[in-house]
Image (tube, grey):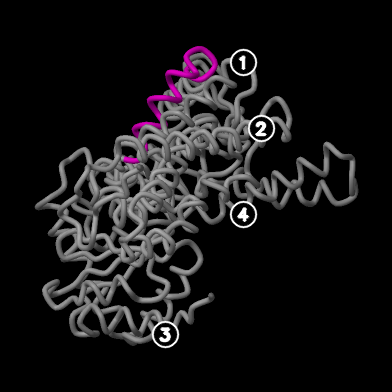
Amino acid sequence: MRTDPAQVAATILSSVGGPANVASVAHCMTRLRLVLTDPARVEQQALREVPGVLGVVVDGDSYQVVLGPGAVVRVTAEFEELLGRSTARRLAVRGEELRQERRRRNATPVKLALRRVANVFVPLIPALIGCGVLAGVNGLLVNARLLPSVTPALTAVASAFMALIAVFVGHNTAKEFGGTPVLGGAVAAIVVYPGVAKVTAFGVALAPGQGGVLGALAAALLGTYVEKWCRGRIPQTLDVLLTPTVTILVSGLATLYGLMYAAGALSTAIGTAANWLLTTTGALAGLILGGLFLPLVMLGLHQALIPIHATLIEQQGHTVLLPVLAMAGAGQVGAALAVYVRLRHDTSLRTTIKSALPAGLLGVGEPLIYGVSLPLGRPFLTACAGGAAGGAFIGVFAMLGDPVGATAIGPSGWALFPLVAGSGGTGTALAVYAGGLLTGYVVGFLATYAVGLAPTITGVPGDRTPERST
């Protein structure tokens, strides 16, 4: 049943204490993120029971309401409309202050760095998904020799964003780290400018695109620091003229004669390592990656892998890591199904599973993590076991010469099927990916059914005594 975004937004707003209690509003791919003035005013049970809400994640004074892809954009727009445009802007400023203060208190330097890098790439995911799907469709048309007059146009539409992704990475990097976004984009554009082929660094001619998104990230980050240095030293009367000039000149030369070369070497190493990892130690690598990915999702650190995925897509046309990591969601689904079967008399928990399971099948794992497996304890571990088994399954086929990749990042679960690609052909890649999902479902289910539930589970509301076989 489709929910009305306006009604969902209004009910959420009421449940979190009304407009006066909302300090800021933002959203990511799946969550409405609210920073609240007084978290004690939240009616938590009412918030979790709002139709369309798949789960709630609490982090200090921040409430992250899981709504799922697509729905979160519509509900956020309605939520901001309810707050009012001027109020939303004022609250956004105040909320950013609160968020930065909380991050300074709680975040370690490593976590903070990873999240800031993730903030650079997360806004690019919708374009990556759209272009990835179009690239997959175009590949099918080319292989089937259909619509030859259309495929060149489709190639241009699907490839243009990836050809210029460095500019967008530079823009977002400067914005995230406190620089002028357009200057970050200008410096990063050097990486993809065709004229760099005439420049020689370390005795070798540069290639347009050398270093890719990592080079763009480094160039824009350097540009931001150069800009800040200039702002503090150049007289105000000359700032508008000299600061942009010095920023682009210094950062641009450093990019040409150092960063592109270094980032290119690093990008090549990432691609070589990823391929070696799966083709040489595929089963073991898949086991480890698939088993450890759920804890990364739980901590929100999985977004830090986006630069690696983007680098692999730039180099090879697909990322071989994403299908392996997606197996974690399969193990989670299998574990949730086992809990549903075992706890037959727990109406509340079974209702939660039924509402969260469709999102889990489509690769949105937070509702099942925070609503089911993590509160119960053991099912979280057995879900990781299912993910490890699915990852190992895909790793085995990579060792046999049939690696599976994804042409874009963002979706997982069933939603990844349109983006699956492989050197053995689309049919083989789809079959291997489906086999990995099935393995994750089955192992996650069996492990949870056998050992994932204690005889009497406490600490979670409701009856948690599993049915015993006779």
Q: Which mark is residue 6?
A: none
Please say if the residues under marks 4 and 1 sit with CB atoms less than 8 Å apart: no
For the residues carrying marks 4 and 1, which lies nearer the camera in this image?
1
Q: Which residue is mark 4?
A: 130
Position of 26 with respect to 405 (left or right) is left
Residue in front for this viewpoint, 41 or 190: 41
Q: Which mark is residue 429?
A: 2
Residue 67 visible in rendering = yes
The secondary structure that most of the magenta stretch takes on is: helix
Residue in front for this viewpoint, 7 or 73: 7
Label 2: how many residues lie within 10 Å, few (<14), some (14-19) or many (20+)?
many
Residue 206 x/y as whole percent: 56, 25
Q: At numbered mark 2, what does the secondary structure look like: helix, strand or loop?
A: helix
Residue in front for this viewpoint, 293 or 205: 293
Q: Which residue is mark 1?
A: 400
Q: Which residue is mark 3?
A: 7
Residue 173 x/y as whole percent: 37, 49
- The residues tagged by marks 4 and 3 sit, at their Cα atoms, a distance apart of 29 Å
Indicate whether 369 appears above or below 289: below
Label 3: how many residues lie within 10 Å, few (<14), some (14-19) or many (20+)?
some
Mark 1 is on which residue type?
A: Leu
Q: Which residues are magenta?
A: 277-294
Mark 3 is on which residue type?
A: Gln
Indicate whether 340 appears above or below 13: above
- The residues tagged by marks 3 and 2 sit, at their Cα atoms, a distance apart of 42 Å
Q: At numbered mark 3, what does the secondary structure look like: helix, strand or loop?
A: helix
Q: Residue at x 32, y 74 (%)?
A: 49
Earlier sequence position, callout 1 versus callout 3: 3
- The residues tagged by marks 1 and 3 sit, at their Cα atoms, a distance apart of 52 Å
Q: At numbered mark 1, what does the secondary structure look like: helix, strand or loop?
A: loop
Earlier sequence position, callout 4 versus callout 1: 4
